Amino acid sequence: MDYALPDAIRVDTDGPVRIVRLARAAQLNAVNEDLHLGLARVFPLLSADADARVAVITGEGRAFSSGGDFDLLDRMVKDRELRRDTIAEGRELVLNMIRCRVPVVAAVNGPAVGLGCSVVALSDVVYMAESAYLADPHVAVGLVAADGGPLTWPLHTSLLLAKEYAFTGDRIGAARAREIGLANHVCPDGEVLSAALAAAHRIASLPRQAVEATKRVLNLHVERAVLATIDFAMAAETESFDTTELRENIARFLRRSSAFG
């Protein structure tokens, strides 16, 4: 099957397994327009791929994803049409992941921040490298996490822990993530993709209808929880772009980035 996607995301075939690679390694797989669009589109394509049984998602280079690209955020502050379209695309991304026919195994090879953290939270099985971590700094930057951890973390861990990490944006190391229910397995650095692929092939060898229907049964819980919250969250995130705090934080980051660039 031809996966017509932006260059920022790539799909490779490994028998019945599809390997989805976030492919902006030089930018630590920060989510720009192309990667955002690619993530929204790839999961329906996986569902439509009749030969696909399981997907593994990982990042190229040192990071899974370093979060949102601040140049994109800056343009979203200034361009209301871009803001509307990108936030709507984020809603589509979340629901497309939840409704994806095939199980999705995350191979978290490095930091998974912001939307990268959300992709991990929406995956079905999570393998993390020992040095990897999760973080959702939406609130710390000045954004409501409309497509972030707060949508699904309360289903994985306690509500109190979900609140703490959503408010603070603190890093959640791999061992801690496994301890509190945000990851299944922790692997030595360099072995996370091979471990995730082994799990994916094991799942792919199981009876197809039973696997896919069981995933749907489990994800109905996720979908109902997300649909109860996501529209308010999206409206609130849209408002965030008009706040002084967010605009100042973006400007500060871009100045610092320019100084070091």
Image (cartoon, grey):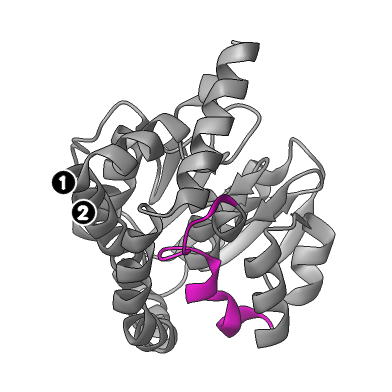
Q: Could you say which is closer to the camera, residue 89 or residue 56?
A: 89
Q: In this view, does 142 lie to the left or right of 169?
A: left
Q: Where is residue 84 in the image (x, y as percent from the top left)?
A: 21, 53
Q: Where is residue 155 in the image (x, y as percent from the top left)?
A: 56, 84
Which amino acid, mark 1? Glu
Question: If the image is split into quadrants, where does the N terminus sit?
Answer: top left
Instruction: Identify residue for label 2.
Output: 84
Res 11 quadrant in image: top left
What range is drawn magenta here? Answer: 141-157
Which amino acid, mark 2? Arg
Instruction: Identify residue for label 1.
Output: 81
Q: Residues within 10 Å of mark 2 (few under 14, many from 20)?
A: some
SS class of the residue under badge 1? Answer: helix
Q: Can residue 66 be seen in this view?
A: yes
Q: Residues within 10 Å of mark 1 (few under 14, many from 20)?
A: few
Q: In this view, does 258 lie above or below 168?
A: above
The residue located at (34%, 83%) in the rendering is 213
The residue located at (46%, 64%) in the rendering is 144
User: Does residue 211 show up magenta in the picture?
Assistant: no
